[in-house]
Amino acid sequence: MCFPPAGAGASAFRQWRSFASIDLALVRLAGREARIDEEPPLTVDAALDEVSLELADDRNRVGLFGLCFGAKLAFELARRFEAQGASPLFVAVAGQAAPHRSGATSSLSQLPDRDLIQALAADGGIPDDVLAVQEMVALILPALRADLGLAERFTYQPGVKLRCPIIAIADTRGAGGDEDRLSTWADLTSGGFALRVIDGGPMFLTQPSRDVVEAIAAAAAHLA
């Protein structure tokens, strides 16, 4: 089950369907793509409620992957499963430091549209093909702003470590955090940890490549 970055939808992983050798389930949150007319979730719990119900019968048979803020959603869903007596196969994360080490939260969601777009573009948070089309930018801004607000309001609550492994994927360019920041995820599991460093390419934070899938699959097999 794949959680996209802030403001994005299932299309962030559209390339994966052509080469992933596993059943691929994509999180489709309200407020984007086919659900653009729905109000986006305002809390992490609200974002996870629907996904949790969808996976109710597969909690012990699913691996979770989250990109950027989606990594925190994947982690919090795993915590919810474990509180219910289940455990996913693994949690894989990319482009995001562990929630207990994420540091101060920015206030990007409060910026005017132009400043927000510039800030995210400079950090690789909006794909170039979207930036090139003003109408597309205007279309994604409401969900993007809502998700950033969700991230800014999120507060990590310490708890029992996960029993499942955590796999962290770092980019050689340091996009979304360097190896030191990504390695902090090891603190949150008793089930094993793997850090893989790959060349994620220029779209690592928005449309992860085949190398990400292969790194996750290899690490999961090693930790099984």
Image: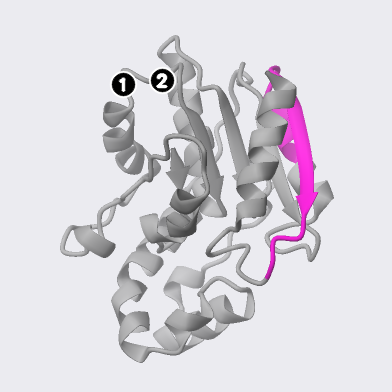
- Determine whether 33 is above or below 45 in the image: below
Q: Position of residue 194 (x, y in %)?
A: 76, 33
Crowd class of label 2 (few under 14; some 14 to 19; many from 20; radius 10 Å): many
The answer to whether residue 144 is visible is yes
For the view shown, which residue lies furthest in the right direction? Answer: 180
Q: Position of residue 120 (x, y in %)?
A: 55, 76
Provide the residue span drawn in magenta. Answer: 184-201
Q: Which residue is mark 2?
A: 59
Q: Quadrant of the C terminus?
A: top right
The answer to whether residue 96 is visible is no
Residue 192 among magenta residues: yes
- Determine whether 127 is above or below 168 in the image: below
State the residue at coordinates (39%, 43%). 44
| Quarter holding residue 92 | top right
Question: Is the residue under label 1 in contact with that under label 2 (CB below 8 Å)?
Answer: yes
State the residue at coordinates (68%, 25%). 221
- At label 1, which amino acid type do we have? Ala
State the residue at coordinates (74%, 46%). 182
- Determine whether 78 is above or below 15 in the image: above
What number is the disc on residue 56?
Answer: 1
Which of the two residues, 7 or 212, is positioned nearer the viewer here? 212
Which of the two residues, 207 or 7, is positioned nearer the viewer here? 207
Horizontal placement of 51 versus 183: left or right?
left
Residue 178 among magenta residues: no
State the residue at coordinates (41%, 62%). 8
Q: Secondary structure at mark 2?
A: loop
Q: Position of residue 165 (x, y in %)?
A: 66, 24
